[in-house]
Image (cartoon, rainbow, N blue to C red):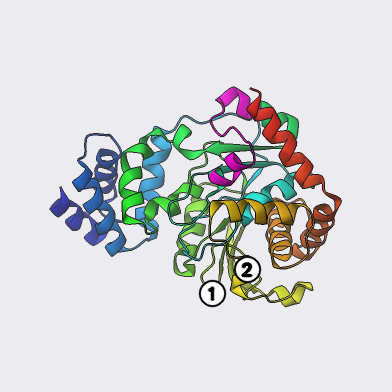
Amino acid sequence: MANNLEKILENTEQNKQELKFYLEHILSGDASDEEIKMTLIQLNKHGIEYHLLSALVDVMNSLVEDIDFNTHNFVDTCGTGGSGLQIFNCSTISSFVVASCGGKVVKHGNKSITSKSGSADFLVRVGVNIENSFENSISAFNQFGITFLFAPKFHTQLKYVAQQRKELGVKTVFNVVGPLVNPGNPDYQIIGTSDSTINLDIAKVLKNKNLKKALIVSSKDGIDELSVTSSSDVYELKNGEINSYEINPLDYGLSIYDLSEIQVNSLEEAHLFGLEVLNGKRGAGHDMVALNAGAALYASDCVETIAEGIELASRELHSGRPLLLLNKYAKFTSEL
């Protein structure tokens, strides 16, 4: 099979059906651990590109059971991870700020593969039950305007590659495809990646999924978020058109910080850092959450500009309402 994959990858556009068949085999439970490991290595060697992403999205969408919220008017803030820089859970915290501002959020996520704390790890730490049923996930969304979809629960086939991904300990195509296969099928997304060279291909995949609006972002120092340690590259999908630009925190009245000011060394540190931000502590964490939540509000058409979104998110952080929302959400899910 490995030799077959090598030939398939020589022309992924022409060989898309064969590639999809191969990926279906890897996710079927019939492939050996060694076969899966070698596949991940070969795919990493090939590199992430549009036709590979498109094929894997098609395969995973064909295997997932969609969840119906009776609307697609919500945003997902799920990023790819894989930076290796051990940044706090910015997108997770930002999602509760967005919801507290009145935006609707269906966040898709997983436990950590390459970092100290993934979105699911953080939420479990604050008391959220991430194993909610479809019905309870919908109930939480209807009551709070936000819900979390734990990727392995909805994409059960991921269990067949999980151990090999963990053993490799590096970003793979499955990191990148995760944000592209939210089972709620959002109309809006902001996706952070640690490699800006793949962002145009991600934007093209989202365009084919007919999203209304999306931002695909990477900081210039390799963070899979909009950063306050450097400027960031952005691809924006809007009305079927893709444009690119840069975002500099200084242009929005924010500061430039040292990388160490947003890093954490353990799950416990990630938990405490997030709670400090939600409690209104000023500094790098606050500014980074305000920036990313503001961009998510813009990406979901809740505000007209990113600047307006940042201002709204900053005010909301200082109100204490996002932390209250997180606590209410955690209590609701834990009692179900």
Exactly how many numbered labels are in the figure?
A: 2
The CA distance from mark 1 to mark 2 is 8 Å
Q: Quadrant of residue 140?
A: top right
- The answer to which of 318 and 52 lies nearer the viewer is 318
Which is nearer the N-term, disc 1 or disc 2? 1
What are the residue bounds of the magenta stretch? 121-138
Q: Label 1, on which residue?
A: 221
Q: Secondary structure at mark 2?
A: loop
In this rendering, is residue 62 above or below 11?
A: above
Residue 159 vs residue 149: left or right? left
In this rendering, is residue 81 above or below 106?
A: below
Q: Residues within 10 Å of mark 1 (few under 14, many from 20)?
A: some
Q: Are marks 1 and 2 in contact (CB under 8 Å)?
A: yes
Q: Label 2, on which residue?
A: 227
Quadrant of the snapshot with the C terminus = top right
Q: Secondary structure at mark 1?
A: loop
Amino acid on which disc 2 is placed? Ser
